[in-house]
Image (cartoon, rainbow, N blue to C red):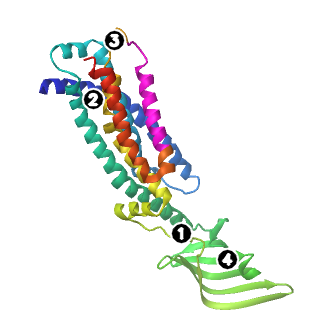
Amino acid sequence: MSKLFKYLGDQLFSSFLSFFLPLFGIASLIFFIKLVSVTAVIPMDFKELLELYLFILPQILFFTLPIAFFAAAIGALHRLSFEYETIALFSLGIGPKRILAFFRQYATFLSLALLFLSLVLIPQAKQLYKGFIVYKKFQAKIDLKPSEFGHRFGNWYLFIEKKGPNGYENVALYNQKFQKHENFIIAKRAKIDNKQGLKLLLFSGHAYTYEPNRLKQIDFDTLILYDTSDKHIFQYKDSILYWKEALSNHRRAYDLTLFILFSLFPLVSLYFIVALGIHNPRYEKGGIFVKSLGVMALYFGISFAISKALGFWALAFAPIWFLLGLLYYNKKIAKRY
């Protein structure tokens, strides 16, 4: 039995690599292109892009692993059937139940791994990704370059003549609509302070407010401008708090239900794997992979639809799918072999 399982394991592994590597490469390329588009808004180097890629790596693995396993398992059994090796196994008294037991252990392990990916790693990775983007936007906002136009601090247009050892020198700010009037501020020195909120400290300057037929001037030693443009504060949550929101948040409930259904796909589709993979090459020469794609499209399509419509009730689809696979297996395999 150990030699049989080792032989089947070698067949499954070689088939798995042939499916997983292309899928993983294509998915990585698609996500990496999306990451590169972020650099149009937020400047970052290749090392930071690689860091962002690591944050989305759990999502790539989550969506590629179950598809690769399902296709690889069917492909391995199809090759054994096509080469008449399954018939040889059956003649030696090794029936479909033993083959089923072999794939069950891998499917169970993979489903558990996918549950860990989806319920633990992906929430953390998503939050790290979001936090990194927020941080880079914040960093870009305070990374002011002298003698360049286009800088903004909140609702104020900002120009800096040069950067000195103690901050910025000869600073000018303009706001056309502050308190419904045009405002202009000049200061000899300025510096950024990001403690307890982002603020700009201005020293030794003048503030001007233009009203119809009137110009007001205020001289100041120190003026503090707060950036009130960012109204959403990122708050990190652990996995339990993250998924607890599914009880009151429909979007989070949809994600949780869909993740669980996707994670259970290898296990609840076990009978479909054996039923589609094992066949008589004399009478069933083609259509195996078309059927496999159809089964995957049907499962994932129904999972998407009912998760959005039914919420947690959609989890009942997993045992229903398992029973459908069992019925198909009994009709096609159990009664023949």
Residues marked 4 and 3 touching at CB (< 8 Å)? no
Query: Rounded to the nearest whole Å, what is the CA distance between mark 1 and mark 2?
Result: 47 Å
Q: Label 4 is placed on what type of residue?
A: Ala
Residue 178 sits above or below residue 103 on the image? below
Closest to the camera, between mark 3 and mark 2, is: 3
Tell me the chief SS of the magenta region.
helix
The residue labelled by disc 3 is 281
Query: According to the image, label 4 marks what residue?
Result: 172
**Which of labels 4 and 2 is toward the front?**
2
Whether residue 285 is in magenta: the answer is yes
Q: Residue at 20% of width from left, 21% of height from top?
A: 95
Q: SS at mark 4?
A: strand
| Labels 3 and 2: the sequence-earlier one | 2
Q: Nearer the viewer, residue 269 or 56?
A: 269
- The residues tagged by marks 4 and 2 sit, at their Cα atoms, a distance apart of 65 Å
Q: Amino acid at mark 2?
A: Phe
Is mark 1 in CB contact (under 8 Å) with mark 2? Answer: no
Three-letter amino acid code at the position of disc 1: His
| Secondary structure found at label 3 | loop
First along the sequence among labels 1 and 2: 2
Mark 3 residue type? Pro
The reply to whether the magenta stretch includes residue 73 is no
